[in-house]
Image (cartoon, rainbow, N blue to C red):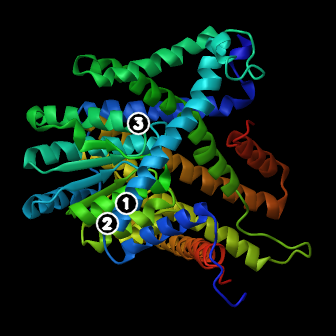
Amino acid sequence: MAGWFEQANWNLALFTLILGGVLLASIRAALRGRVPRVRVLPGVAAMAEAVGRAVEMGRPVFFVPGTRDLDNVQTVAGLAVLGELAALTARLECRLEVLTDRSLVMAAAREAGRAAYLAAGRPETWRDDSVSYVSDDQFGFVARVDGLIARERPATCFWLGAFSAESLLLAEAGSQIGAIQIAGTAERSQLPFFIAACDYTLIGEELFAASACLTGDPALLGTLRGQDLGKAVAGGALLLGSLLATAAALTHWPFIVKLQSALQRLFSAGGP
Amino acid sequence: MSGGLHLSSSVEVWVGAALTLMVFSYLWRDNPFYKLAEHVFVGVSAAYVMVLGFWTTLWPNAIAKLWPGAARLTTPEAVEPTHDWALLLPVILGLLMLGRLHPRTVWLSRWPTAFAIGTSAGYNLVRYLRSDFLAQIHSGMTPSLIATTGGRLALGESLSHAILLGGTICGIVYFTYTRQHRGAWARVAGTGVLFMMVTFGTTFGYTVMARISLLVSRLHFLLGTWLGLI
């Protein structure tokens, strides 16, 4: 059994249990009626309006769930938002075009779209062709999407997921035709381009919170409360750690030095 | 400067130059030349990735290890004569994806999709907890007041650490969702946004410079390799 556990990583197990426990407790509390009030994210609030605009203009909505595979959590978050948007486009009878660069993502996007149309009571209007695979090649994908944007002139473009160098190329093409653009990514290097070229941008973790805000599902909103508590732990640990490090450096008192060293070991990423 | 036009005699260079100009024509507007380049690019890249995937993933990782006899027909020296039957599992999951080809068997493809999402979620939980939670906190636990060897305050270094700590805390406050951003909380969150925007601004400038170097490289190809002007 010893081979099953890497004892040096006990702090990873501890924090997994603590944070997981906090998340589960928050979900349980939300399901019992203590649903947290979540602040309004402008990018999420604008989604329905952006789809409504596409309906009014009689133009399609484009959605790209990032350019990574299903093993990326941002892709999964993008697909979760796609589910909600697809339900909206189903209700409003708006044409939705989802463009993917990975076969597995295409399959998952079709599942999400089909399930959303079914839940919206309009399964007969769902077309698998709404979700298409373009190419695994980064710039081959960009060439196709930009060409489609120029020809189809979508009223709204959603760029939600993990993006690389193609972010500005995609968002600039949408900006050129005057589409409302809502982007979201946790890729720090690509956020500046989305912020510059899009109307709304979900920054980093806002992408993961978007589906909870859109659905209002108590279980998902509960996870947001749990995550906030996790952030409080992180902020508190940072403040305490910095305070102890400062006191240890200035006073060299053995007790404080030992305490600071213990705290650093607790948060050591390579095992204490 | 070499002083005159020295056109390349390589067909490869001519095709590359033509496709480059076709793609650049998008700057004017969508046109048949761009459309042609787009279709060639998408078709060639999709086919290339498929062939690459077969020879670098499917062949060495599945076929060569499950059926070494068959694999030895093409690469006799690279194939070990042992069978790794555990690889049948991913092969079966891969085959289940083909269930999408018929409406009545679509449900089969949900199993590999669920497997991919589930395993990546489990795997990433530990990875992100380590890199985005523990490592970040650990590296932020630095003294905010630093003394020099002479016992005086190292102002620059202390300020740098204090800004790092303050920026991180303000950023964390901005990313809280279940507390409304009002009053002092909103001001702290606003400072967090300010920190992020400064970071994004510097990243933007840095990346624009990198993109310009890509443009220079393409122009060098057109003017040098193709036309021989430089």
According to the picture, the residue beneath numbered tag 2 turns out to be B32
> Which image quarter: residue B83?
top right
Please tell me whether mark 1 sits on a helix, a strand or a loop: helix
According to the picture, the residue beneath numbered tag 1 turns out to be B36
For the residues tagged 2 and 1, is the chain the same?
Answer: yes
The residue positioned 57% from the left and 37% from the top of the image is B52
Residue A6 higher or lower than B135, as above or below: above
Please tell me whether mark 2 sits on a helix, a strand or a loop: helix
Report the side of B220 relative to A170 (left or right). Answer: right
According to the picture, the residue beneath numbered tag 3 turns out to be A103
Quadrant housing the C terminus of chain A: top right
User: The residue under label 3 is which amino acid type?
Assistant: Ser
Where residue B176 appears, x then y in whole percent? 41, 54
User: The residue under label 1 is which amino acid type?
Assistant: Leu
* Residue A116 tag number: none
> Which image quarter: residue A28?
top left
Where residue A1 appears, x then y in whole percent? 70, 10
Residue B213 higher or lower than B134, as above or below: below
Output the chain of dot 1: B
Give the camera-side residue of B204 and A133: A133
Report the side of B206 relative to A40 (left or right). Answer: right
The residue positioned 38% from the left and 43% from the top of the image is A77
